[in-house]
Image (cartoon, rainbow, N blue to C red):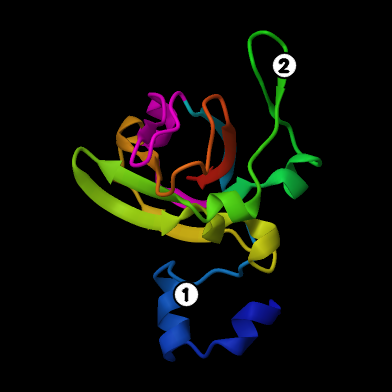
């Protein structure tokens, strides 16, 4: 018998939410595809919105979760390397607190979160869970909320979990 199934009675609130697909174990990413997306800042002005590139695979999927790699995690994961071959380190969690992640469709904001809330090492090893399917990845962006928080050519790496 599955330990999680035994905890939820079939007609309980959690049982009904699980059956509808709204409840999942936090550490379970089984069945989700995962893609690393790198975002390179082209400007560093206050209020600047750095949009993600066009990605038909993420546009035609359901985003189930996102985590952001900080400087600690990037040591264990692939990092963005510029065309010149230069290594680009990810930002610290403190710097990410001054950035805002927005998942959007045209001008409609579907998800709006401070970027540092999506760092797994700062969130007990958990990624941010979503169930969003009408996003347009190229309309989504990271906005700079504080002067001097990022520099031109700084990089953010996200792990996007989707179905």
The residue under label 1 is 18
Tell me if I can see residue 31 in this picture.
no
55 above or below 68? above
Residue at left offset 53%, top offset 61%? 117
Q: Is residue 2 magenta?
A: no
Give the class, few, some or many, for how many residues have Cα within 10 Å of label 2's Cα (few <14, many ≥20). Answer: few
135 above or below 84? below
Is 43 on the left-hand or right-hand side of 47? right
Is 67 on the left-hand or right-hand side of 13? right
- Where residue 158 sits: x, y (%)? 57, 41
Residue at left offset 59%, top offset 58%? 127
* Number of numbered tags placed on the structure image: 2
Rendered image quadrant of residue 56:
top left
Is 136 on the left-hand or right-hand side of 63? left
Give the class, few, some or many, for how many residues have Cα within 10 Å of label 1's Cα (few <14, many ≥20). Answer: some
Q: Which of 22 and 44 is in front in this view?
A: 44
Residue at left offset 72%, top offset 12%? 85
Residue at left offset 63%, top offset 63%? 126
129 above or below 150? below
Q: What stretch is highlighted in magenta?
A: 42-66
- Where residue 83 sits: x, y (%)? 63, 10
The residue under label 2 is 86
95 above or below 42? below
**Which of the two marks, 2 or 1, is nearer to us in this view?**
2
């Amino acid at each position: 018998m599955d330990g999680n199934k035994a905890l939820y009675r079939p007609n309980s609130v959690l049982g009904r939410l699980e059956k509808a697909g709204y409840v999942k174990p936090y550490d379970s990413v089984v069945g989700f595809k995962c893609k690393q997306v790198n975002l390179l800042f082209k400007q560093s002005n206050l209020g600047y919105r750095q949009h993600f590139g066009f990605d038909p695979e993420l546009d035609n999927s359901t985003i189930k979760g996102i985590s952001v790699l900080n400087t600690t995690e990037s040591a264990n994961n692939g990092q963005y390397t510029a065309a010149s071959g230069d290594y680009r380190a990810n930002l610290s969690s403190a710097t990410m607190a001054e950035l805002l992640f927005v998942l959007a469709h045209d001008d409609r904001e579907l998800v709006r979160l401070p970027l540092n809330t999506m760092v797994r090492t700062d969130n007990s090893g958990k990624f941010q869970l979503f169930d969003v399917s009408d996003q347009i990845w190229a309309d989504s962006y990271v906005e700079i909320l504080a002067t001097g928080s990022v520099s031109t050519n700084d990089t953010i790496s996200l792990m996007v979990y989707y179905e």
